[in-house]
Amino acid sequence: MTPFFTRERFGRPQVYAGLLLLAFIGQCLWLMGRVPLSLLERAYVEAGRQQWRGEHVAGDVERSPLVPLIAGAPTLLSGEFEPAPPAVPTGSEAPRGENPWRWLVRLPFLVMGALLGASLWYVARRLYGNTGGYIALALYVFSPAMIVRSATVRPDASRPMGERPSRPVPATALSVRA
C-alpha cells in the first residue's frame, strides 16, 4: 500500500495553495481576536444551546437550524456562556470584553471557509490550470467579504458569494384561482 503523502500527490502547486490558505487562516484568526461576539452571534449561540438541550427548534421555515447548532455545540462543555451582555449598547456589537468562547464558537466557520477556499482552488486548477487556480485562490484569500464570512458566525458561511438562498414558495402562490 502506498503512503498518502507522496511526491506525485503533493507537489509545488499544493504547497503554494496551502501557503495561500495559511495566509487566509491567519487573517481570519486576526479578525476573530479583534472583534468581540456580536449580538447576532450571541443569539445564534443561545438558539443552538436551547436546541441542544431540547427546549425548542432553532430554525424556522426559511432558516436551517444547522448554523445555531454548530455555533452552540462548543458551549455545551460548560454552562458559563453569557447569552446577552449585561449592558446592551445601541450598536450591533456587544461591549468590548474578553469572551473565552468566541474562538471555539467561530472555529467551525473558519474551517468551512478554508475548505471552501481549497475547493475553489481545486476546481479552478482543474478547469484553468495552475495559474487560474492561484488567481482564483488569491482573490478568495484576500477578499474582505470572505474573511468576515469565515471569521464570524453567519448563516451563509458555507455558501458561495453569488448563490442565493432557496426560499420556499408562499402558499398564496400555490393556490388556484377560478
Image (tube, rainbow, N blue to C red):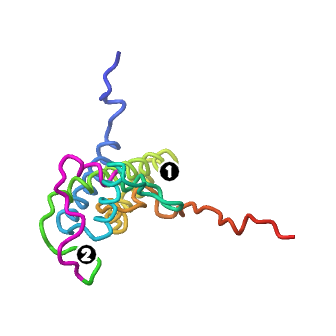
Q: Main secondary structure of the magenta part?
A: loop
Nearer-the-camera pick, 11 or 3 = 3
Where is residue 92 drawn, in percent x and y? 29, 77
Q: Earlier in the sequence, mark 1 or mark 2?
A: 2
Residue pointed to by mark 2: 93
Q: Which mark is residue 155?
A: none
Q: Is residue 40 above or below residue 5?
A: below
Which amino acid, mark 2? Glu
Q: Which quadrant does the N terminus fall into?
A: top left
Task: Specify whether residue 29 is painted magenta.
Answer: no
Which amino acid, mark 1? Tyr
Nearer-the-camera pick, 4 or 45 = 45
Q: Residue at x 46, y 63 (%)?
A: 161
Task: Specify whether residue 76 is painted magenta.
Answer: yes
SS class, disc 1: helix
Residue pointed to by mark 1: 128
Where is residue 164 drawn, in percent x and y? 54, 64
- Disc 1 crowd rating (10 Å Cα; few below 14, some 14-19, many 20+) is few
Most extreme residue toward the right is 178
